[in-house]
Structure formats: structure tokens, C-alpha cells
Amino acid sequence: MKKLFVLVLFICSFANGQDIRELYKEKFNDDWKVYEDQDYVKKYIDTTIVYKLESGRSPEEELLFQAKENHKKRAEKLSQIFSSLKVNLKEFDSLVFIEQRSTNLNLEYDFVKKGAIITKDSIYGFKYDLEKENNGIENYNYFGNAENETLSQAKFIIGNLILSAKTNYLDSLAKVESEMLQGPLQNLRPETEFEILVYNKNNSELRRIYLHETFVRIINQK
């Protein structure tokens, strides 16, 4: 009985002791596993054509390999951001991570990512430039800066919902926005994407929400 108790304690300690890199890899491994599905892969390449790339992998294998690499790199970048801002996931019962990125590949500032980690007592803003050689994380007043009025409104709404512990509203906004962009507003092209990670220590929850600045326009239309 004593051994069983120790084992349970160890498992609980491991679950609550994960860092952001481990947790992200675990929760979102479908990011790469989906490429193990032949039907999904057919959307991207003609699987009836058999040939090898310079890497020695087939196109199907290459897609899966790159998806795994991108997933790993994303987890590493998150770990780098948390470490740079001196935010230890294990010390918080809950927090929210936001990263803002441009979806317009023609803009010169596309490679600059901005965001913040919001805890119960603090906001840690950051930015980094993928074009810079060292990819260094810099402190940044995320909620104090915005490129335009729509972005200011979007950040204000997102920030207030997080600080008010109403992150479920973000899920609802994302659902409505997705439906509208696939329906009556399908010609509306978002220029900015927000990746939002909501962490809760009690059940090792890490859920991911994607929003765009277009949700503000949708709200204003109603």
C-alpha cells in the first residue's frame, strides 16, 4: 500500500511539475500526428506519385518530418520565452500566454512576434524577430503598443477577458469568428493572428485558442 501511495505521489508530482515545453508537446502532438493519416496528406500532395526528395524521404515522409520539427521548434521557442521572462510554469496555478503574429507574408515586419504572459499578479510583455540572427527575446509593453485601432481593440478585449477570468468567452469568440469567416464574411482576410494558450495547473490543462483581429469587426457589426 505504501509503494502504491509513493507511485501515485510521483505521478502527480510529474504532472504538476512539467514545464511549458513538455506540456505543449504532450497536449498538441496532433499537430504532427495528423500527417500520419494518408487521407489528410492527400490534401497537400499527390500520393500516387512515388519519388524521393534530396533528404531521401518521400513527400509523405517529408511532410511528417517537417511537422514534427516545427512542433518541436515551437515548444522550444515557448520555453525560451518563459525562461527569458523568468516565468516558471511550476510556480503558478494558472496563466495565459498570448502571441501576436502577422498573416500577411508581404509585410516587412512579418517576422516580428509580440505577446505577453499574464499571471494573477503580473503581465510580462515580449517581442522577438525571426530575421535576427540570435532571435533574442526582448521585454515589450505589449498592451501599451498597437499598430492600429482595430488591434488596440482586439488586445483590449482579449486582455480584459483574461484578467476577468473569463477565458471561456475567448473560446466562444473564436468559434463565432471561424463560422463567420467560413460563411458570410469569407471574403474578409485577417491580417493578424493571436495564439492564446490557457494553462490551469489543477488538471495540467493547456488549451489553445486562435483569434484574429477580425473578431473585433464582427462584434462591431452586431
Image (tube, grey):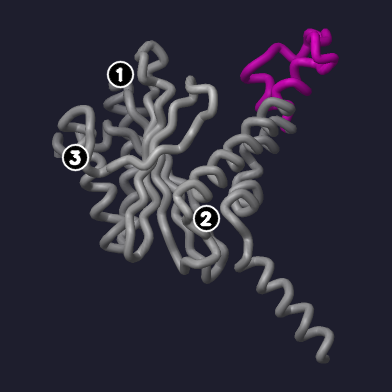
Q: Secondary structure at mark 2?
A: strand
Give the number of the disc on residue 11. none
Q: Secondary structure at mark 1?
A: loop
Q: Name the front one of labels 3 and 1.
A: 3
Does the stretch in magenta take in 45?
A: yes
User: At label 1, which amino acid type do we have?
Assistant: Asn
Using the image as rendered, state which of residue 204 and residue 13 is in the foreground.
13
User: At label 2, which amino acid type do we have?
Assistant: Leu
Q: Name the front one of labels 2 and 1.
A: 2
Quadrant showing the C terminus: top left
- Quick one: label 2 or label 1, which is nearer the N terminus? 1
Q: Is residue 151 left or right of residue 75?
A: left
Q: Would residue 57 be seen by someone viewing this image from the given angle?
A: yes
Using the image as rendered, state which of residue 57 and residue 124 is in the foreground.
124
Q: Label 1 belongs to which residue?
A: 187
Looking at the picture, how far across and down is residue 147, in whole percent?
22, 28
Question: At x 39% / y 30%, what residue is drawn?
Answer: 101
Give the number of the disc on residue 206. 2
- Looking at the rendering, the stretch of residues picked out in magenta corresponds to 37-63
- Quick one: label 2 or label 3, which is nearer the N terminus? 3
